[in-house]
Image (spheres, rainbow, N blue to C red):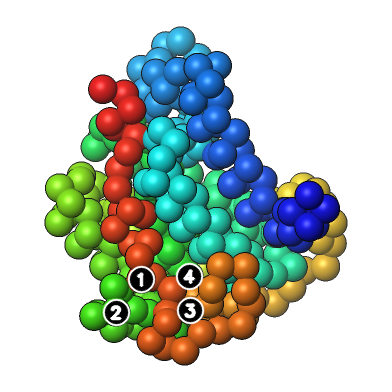
Amino acid sequence: MNAMRQFYMEVPIVTRAYTTVCVLTTLAVHLDLVSPLQLYFNPTLIVRKFQIWRLATTFLYFGTIGISFFFNMIFTYRYCRMLEDGSFRGRSSDFVMMFIFGGVLMTFFGIFVNLLFLGQAFTLMLVYVWSRRNPLVPMNFFGVLNFQAPYLPWVLLCCSMILGNTIWVDIIGMGVGHIYYVLEDVYPQLTNGFRLIKTPYFLKRLFNEHIERNYQTAAEDRPGGFMWGDEQPLEPEAAAVANEAPDAAEQPAGAAIQ
């Protein structure tokens, strides 16, 4: 028990908070404390009934407890933690700002594609940003397909198409991830470029980050090809994607509403 508590407390704060709330939300639905109908994204109810919580809960529910849910949580936890331990290390306030930026854009796009839950899209955004910041990390899919990290989001998109799931959730996640990557990593490096996404000072105070740091795009300190909970990278042939990609691409949320 102490070992589990120690492991939990060692998880970076933003990753720990987000994954914990996602799990608790799913448990609440499983125990019939709340209904998915109270959580899904509905612009009409948000505007007319002031059910503001739906703006958040649409990112927190990943479907009923099962194999798909566990793979989704592992995928979300993994890439969220690698970002926070890597290029966002010591910059938790900027990581939260990425959450806010991505959430606002996905909510806007979600109005036009009628998606009920946006958690899958949020995970794809994390995967996309990580993959673009780690272009040389080798990945492997079922031991037959080898590729570099930037192709990982596209592999997940193809899995969604093969499984017959809606691809809009993947497209929105990748699109928002690309917008963030361009604004945060590409445009500031151009002549006369600068960072367009500014983290409010109160967030820096909240995380006790009083010193402004000069951000430079760099590869993650924790590349993607390592075992669960292990900080040592694996060989290319044992890279991370393997058995989790098809399940992570599933869209269980819509089925929960039916």
Kindly state the secondary structure of the residue where label 2 is placed: loop
Do the residues under discs 2 and 1 have CB atoms within 8 angstroms? Answer: yes
Q: Which mark is residue 101?
A: none
Task: Tell me the amino acid under the disc marked 2.
Answer: Gly
Return the x and y of residue 15 as percentages of the image width and height.
63, 54
Task: Determine which quarter of the picture holds residue 94.
Answer: bottom right
Q: Which mark is residue 130?
A: 4
The residue pinned by badge 1 equals: 242
- What separation in Å lies between label 4 and label 3 (alpha carbons)? 12 Å
Task: Tell me the amino acid under the disc marked 3.
Answer: Gly
- What separation in Å lies between label 2 and label 1 (alpha carbons)? 7 Å
Do the residues under discs 4 and 3 have CB atoms within 8 angstroms? Answer: no
Q: Residue at x 43, y 53 (%)?
A: 71
Q: Pointer 2: residues within 10 angstroms few (<14), some, or many (20+)?
A: few
Of the two numbered discs 1 and 4 in the rendering, the one whose residue sits closer to the viewer: 1
Do the residues under discs 2 and 3 have CB atoms within 8 angstroms? Answer: no
Task: Determine which quarter of the picture holds residue 239.
Answer: bottom left
Task: Tell me the amino acid under the disc marked 1.
Answer: Ala
Q: Earlier in the sequence, mark 2 or mark 4?
A: 4
The residue pinned by badge 3 equals: 225
Locate residue 92 relative to residue 107 in the image: left or right.
right
Mark yes or no: residue 73 visible: yes
Return the x and y of residue 37 as percentages of the image width and height.
39, 18
Mark yes or no: residue 177 visible: no
Above or below 231: residue 38: above
Q: Earlier in the sequence, mark 1 or mark 4?
A: 4
Kindly state the secondary structure of the residue where label 3 is placed: loop
Q: Residue at x 39, y 46 (%)?
A: 67
Task: Tell me the amino acid under the disc marked 4.
Answer: Trp
